[in-house]
Image: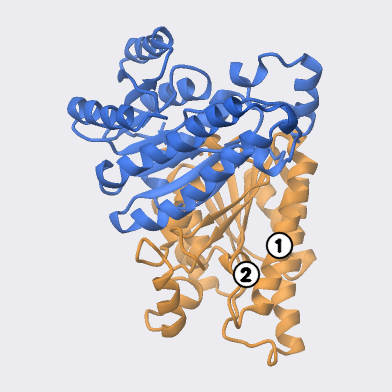
Chain colours: A orange, B blue
Amino acid sequence: MYTLQNKTALITGSARGLGKAIAERYAALGANIVINYSKDKTSADEVVSNITAMGARVIAIQADVSKVADIKRLFKEAKNAFGKIDIVVANAGIEMVETPVTQFTEEQFDRLFSINTKGAYFTMQQAAINVEDNGRIIYIASSTTAFPVQGMAVYGGSKITPRYLVDVLSKEIGHRGVTVNSIIPFAVDHSGIFAEVDSYPELRKSLLDSCPMGRLAEVEDVANVAEFFASDLSSFVNGQHLLVNGGANQ
Amino acid sequence: MKNLSNKVILVTGASKGIGAEVAKKLAEAQASVIVNYSGSKADADSVVETIKSKGGNAIAIQADVSKPGDVKLLFDQSIAHYGKIDVLVNNAGIMITKLIKDTTDEDFTRQFDINVRGVFNTLREAATRLADNGTIINMSTSVNRLMLPTYGTYVATKSAVEQLTRVFSKEVGSRGINVNSVSPGPTNTALFTTGKPQEVIDRLASLSPFNRIGEPNDIAEVIVFLAGDDAKWVNAQNIGVNGGMA
């Protein structure tokens, strides 16, 4: 186990799912935690209670990442609370699957791109401005950008663009010792669209069939890698995109 | 430090350079380490001594990975000594940098024999003899992404290693074994620096946003992560460890 004692980690979209798992992991390693949520205050408060019970310092800050002013406020309040920010995980996002290209609407397109793309861009911009020297910026991407799946055109498109920002930003702030990487999770069970066990049975089956390890990912699998990217073990890993998919073909 | 205390780890080509650093780092994380060497017995013994002097557990075993018989014996002796092998780090390799027009048949064969056949030989043994839920880490190179002149034959061998990694992961996933590769960029070892003027090293360093070449420790830290259970769901991947150069 590595310690994140005296570090502050800000995780967007951390009231539930992957963001929650990463926040709780960092808290278990001793970091101060900034939980962010957009609407689900109840879930965010639960995460705060969990983390407080672990003995870590934590606050929850409401901010809608599709609004740049909200993101700026999020970072400002986080810094006011803990004095500095060492680790930023750009995790907030929404999913949309099983929507053929012939059917998606302008509203759907704008919603996904404003949260997933614009949100990630300005979160990483604020991270680049605010993160301490030798800090960490981690973008949570999607495996559909590596293995395109039908019905995911808008979702995948909105997730692939910030990947380019990871490439560029890693070059721009490497001189400060900051690393910028992305984690590309594969279908995560009990999270996102698979939060319900019986959701999307056909998609679930086809994903399961493609994985040599015979299961979908769990949030802990992704939290393990998020721990690596936050730790000193990865201090020379920069500008990389790591698929965490058990070796699956899609 | 990650705790690898229940793991037996075989590192090929561990007498020098990155391999030696990897062996030491894994031992610091409490793994029992087999330090494989081909010709450099004194160096391998010194790595084992260093590990033991810090309270670690290691043995040195000679084997030329390009020879299937040697590799079989390497597995036999490792398992006889430690009872099992959990993690295989395929690190043994050589690099000959020449323009393709100047590369001899011997240069080509030697690099493929050690870098590709060597990995093939250990994977074939590992398929049935590595412990269930084990881990394999193969060394590739970030030069695969840079296309530098004179590295043609070398990157051909390492590209083959990356493909073996991906396919083998599908073949042993059912036993819970994950297989990944690591691609160091230019790293401060004799393999890399020997014969290179400082200006060449500086130019390569300037390709990295960190403005330096890697140190063996940078690479070893990532191997420690991949060798542990936290990396279990990372499978069939290649991780560049180059400071963001490529």
Identify the element where label 1 is drawn: helix
Cα separation between marks 2 and 1: 8 Å
For the residue pair A173 and A31, the one nearer the viewer reads as A173
Relative to A1, B188 lies left or right:
right
The structure residue drawn at horizontal position 33% and vertical position 25%, both measured from the top left corner, is B33
Q: Give the residue type that dot 2 points to.
A: Gly
For the residue pair B184 and B72, the one nearer the viewer reads as B72
User: Relative to A38, does residue B66 appear above or below in the rendering?
Assistant: above
Which residue corresponds to mark 1? A120
User: Relative to B173, does residue A116 appear above or below in the rendering?
Assistant: below
Can you name the residue that lies furthest to the top here?
B42
For the residue pair B169 and A239, the one nearer the viewer reads as B169
Q: Which mark is residue A93?
A: 2
The structure residue drawn at horizontal position 37% and vertical position 79%, both measured from the top left corner, is A197
Q: Earlier in the sequence, mark 2 or mark 1?
A: 2
Q: In the rendered structure, the residue with mark 1 lies on which chain?
A: A
Q: Which mark is residue A32?
A: none
Residue A162, x across and y down, in percent? 72, 61
Asked whether the residues under the numbered discs 2 and 1 touch, taking CB atoms below 8 Å apart as contact, a structural biologist would say yes
Q: Total label count?
A: 2
Would residue B242 be seen by someone viewing this image from the given angle?
no
- Quadrant (top left/top right/bottom left/bottom right) for the N terminus of chain A: top left
Q: Classify mark 2: residues with Cα within 10 Å, few (<14), some (14-19) or many (20+).
A: many
Dot 2 and dot 1 within a common chain: yes
Identify the element where label 2 is drawn: loop
Q: Classify mark 1: residues with Cα within 10 Å, few (<14), some (14-19) or many (20+).
A: many
The structure residue drawn at horizontal position 75% and vertical position 55%, both measured from the top left corner, is A165
User: Relative to A216, does residue B206 appear above or below in the rendering?
Assistant: above
Q: In the rendered structure, the residue with mark 2 lies on which chain?
A: A
